Image (cartoon, rainbow, N blue to C red):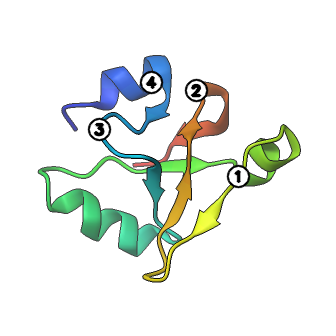
Amino acid sequence: EKYKSSIDNIGLISKSRLHVHLSEDMMTAIEVGGRHGNPVVYRVHADEMRKSGFIFYKSKNGVWLTERVPVWAIERVM
């Protein structure tokens, strides 16, 4: 919740990590976000990003990774 304003303005960035970590479904996103306070969930328009040249990787533990997620590719849903 504390990063909501920043995300709304610049999108999702990796900060100190190599990649942005994305959940595959809403329940996982809520669970992971809840570890850090009140969760705020964004839908990522990954297909549009992929068509624009963004690359996604799936880690062994099922987390999706990408370099960044621009503002135009996110939609706050919760």
Q: Quadrant of residue 34?
A: bottom left
The residue shown at (40%, 51%) is: 41
In the rendered image, which residue does mark 4 sit on?
8
In the rendered image, which residue does mark 2 sit on?
71
Do the residues under discs 1 and 2 have CB atoms within 8 angstroms? no
Question: Which circle's residue, 3 or 1, is located before the other in the chain?
Answer: 3
Relative image position of residue 61 (x, y in whole percent):
43, 82
In the rendered image, which residue does mark 3 sit on?
16
Relative image position of residue 17 (x, y in whole percent):
34, 45
The residue shown at (31%, 64%) is: 30
Is 65 above or below relative to 4? below
Question: Which circle's residue, 2 or 4, is located before the other in the chain?
Answer: 4
Question: Which circle's residue, 3 or 4, is located before the other in the chain?
Answer: 4
Name which residue type carries label 4. Answer: Asp
Q: Quadrant of residue 64?
A: bottom right
Which residue ends up furthest to the right in the rendered image?
51
Residue 46 — which label?
1
Calculate the distance from the C-alpha at mark 2 to the C-alpha at mark 3: 19 Å
Name which residue type carries label 3. Answer: Ser
Q: Nearer the viewer, mark 2 or mark 3?
A: 3
Is 61 above or below relative to 23? below
Provide the secondary structure element on which disc 3 rests: loop
